[in-house]
Image (cartoon, helix red, strand yellow):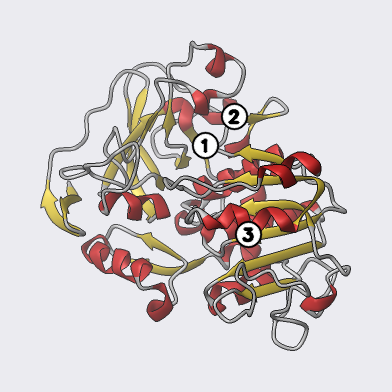
């Protein structure tokens, strides 16, 4: 099969390699689409804590495709549906031991034996990939592979909103304007949350956010305040936000319920030590800050403000179960029911031969306008 092998220094080599082996209970899947994740950028830069040296690996964990072979008798996929050769599937990339206390209680993403397709196992930047059968989710008719490759980041967003325990009346700030941040806005929209603000660096992404449900979008590179969340939260208002479908209508950012503080903040950028120091003053009493971005720097947190206003700082890592349902399955149902809403996140499709170009587009987002780039092997 043809595969993109990471060769170091941001380079990939397109080679013919043997088909990946499939252990008992696993399946081989012909890749229909594979998204490039922000964590893939960290990996090729040598900045990822799990895979500091990815040379020789086949990356890609946001995958969808067609089952071509199943090893053994295990035929039950994610959500309990039977899986057969020829089925169109979305692939959950997390593999675990299935036996520890975390696996048994729905928190399998915390398993000490956690491994990922696209890191520990050959990923989707190839003609074929592999996965356990119980991590395959049958795709509904009409859900294209390209859009289905968004399932992993959408499940991450679903989990983040769940751990934050967001209510429909909460004032929410999404800090960052990448794919996961936009997916969070889409999830909040579907839930009926109306007071959503976003801070980011990229005008195109921010306009996409208003199309997905944000009533206020701030470009922090142009905002006069250090953190981009000024006292009036000024930014795109009714005149230049574009339309969205959350029913509330775009309002001038200086009048988002008059809010200078937010009940929930999603921190999606990682960033340096200053980010948390800037965000905490914007959090309401009893508010929540949810950390999703990969940050390796020491974070400075104004401890007195956190204590005095009883602010909760919550980590959000991948996804698992919510109320006895797989969050990946919840994401699949949401994606299928709101295809147009979430299609805003995907901006580019490329062939496997163009994979270096795809990474370059994401590295130079200001120039390319890329948000989510999807590899479609041809």
The spot of residue 209 in percent (x, y) is 64, 69
Q: Is residue 50 left or right of residue 133?
A: left
Instruction: Tell me which corner region of the image, top left, top right, bottom left or bottom right, holds residue 177.
Output: bottom right
Q: How many labels, in total?
A: 3
- Residue 336 seen by the camera: no
Return the residue at label 1: 137
* Category of crowding for the residue at label 3, using alpha-carbon neighbours closer than 10 angstroms: few (below 14), some (14–19), many (at least 20): some
Q: Is residue 10 left or right of residue 254?
A: left
The spot of residue 358 in percent (x, y) is 31, 66
Q: Which residue is pictured at 68% across the width and 46% down the height?
A: 289
Secondary structure found at label 2: helix
| Marks 3 and 2 in Cβ contact (< 8 Å) | no
Q: Is residue 182 left or right of residue 70?
A: right
Q: Which residue is pictured at 84% across the width and 68% down the height?
A: 247
The spot of residue 31 in percent (x, y) is 34, 48
Return the residue at label 2: 79
| Marks 2 and 1 in Cβ contact (< 8 Å) | yes
Q: State the separation of the CA atoms marked 3 and 1.
A: 40 Å
């Amino acid at each position: 099969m043809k595969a993109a092998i990471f060769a170091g220094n941001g380079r990939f080599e397109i080679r013919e390699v043997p088909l990946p082996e499939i252990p008992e209970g696993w399946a081989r899947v012909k890749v229909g689409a594979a998204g490039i994740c922000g964590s893939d950028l960290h990996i090729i830069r040598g900045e990822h804590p799990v895979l500091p040296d990815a040379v020789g690996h086949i990356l890609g964990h946001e995958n969808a495709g067609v089952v071509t072979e199943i090893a053994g008798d295990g035929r039950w996929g994610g959500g309990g549906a039977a899986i057969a050769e020829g089925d169109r599937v979305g692939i959950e990339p997390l593999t675990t031991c299935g036996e520890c206390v975390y696996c048994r209680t729905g928190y399998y993403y915390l398993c000490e034996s956690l491994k990922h397709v696209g890191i520990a196992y050959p990923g989707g930047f190839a003609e074929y990939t592999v996965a356990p059968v119980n991590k395959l989710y049958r795709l509904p008719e009409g859900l294209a592979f390209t859009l289905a490759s968004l399932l992993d980041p959408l499940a991450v967003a679903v989990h983040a909103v769940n751990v934050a325990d967001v209510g429909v009346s909460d004032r929410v700030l999404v800090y960052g304007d990448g794919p996961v941040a936009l997916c969070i806005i889409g999830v909040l929209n579907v839930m009926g949350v109306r007071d959503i603000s976003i801070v980011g660096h990229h005008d195109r992404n921010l306009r996409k956010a208003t199309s997905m449900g944000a009533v206020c979008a701030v470009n922090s590179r142009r905002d006069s305040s250090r953190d981009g969340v000024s006292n009036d939260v000024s930014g795109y208002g009714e005149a230049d936000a574009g339309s969205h479908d959350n029913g509330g209508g775009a309002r001038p950012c200086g009048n988002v319920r008059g809010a200078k503080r937010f009940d929930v903040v999603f921190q999606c950028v990682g960033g340096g030590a200053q980010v948390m120091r800037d965000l905490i003053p914007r959090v309401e009493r009893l508010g929540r800050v949810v950390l999703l971005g990969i940050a390796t720097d020491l974070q400075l947190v104004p401890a007195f403000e956190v204590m005095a206003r009883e602010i909760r700082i919550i980590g959000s890592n991948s996804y698992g179960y919510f109320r006895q349902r797989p969050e990946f399955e919840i994401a699949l149902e949401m994606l299928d029911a709101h295809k147009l809403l979430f299609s805003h996140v995907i901006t580019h499709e490329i062939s496997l031969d163009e994979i270096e170009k795809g990474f370059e587009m994401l590295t130079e987002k200001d120039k390319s306008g890329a948000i989510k780039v999807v590899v479609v092997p041809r």
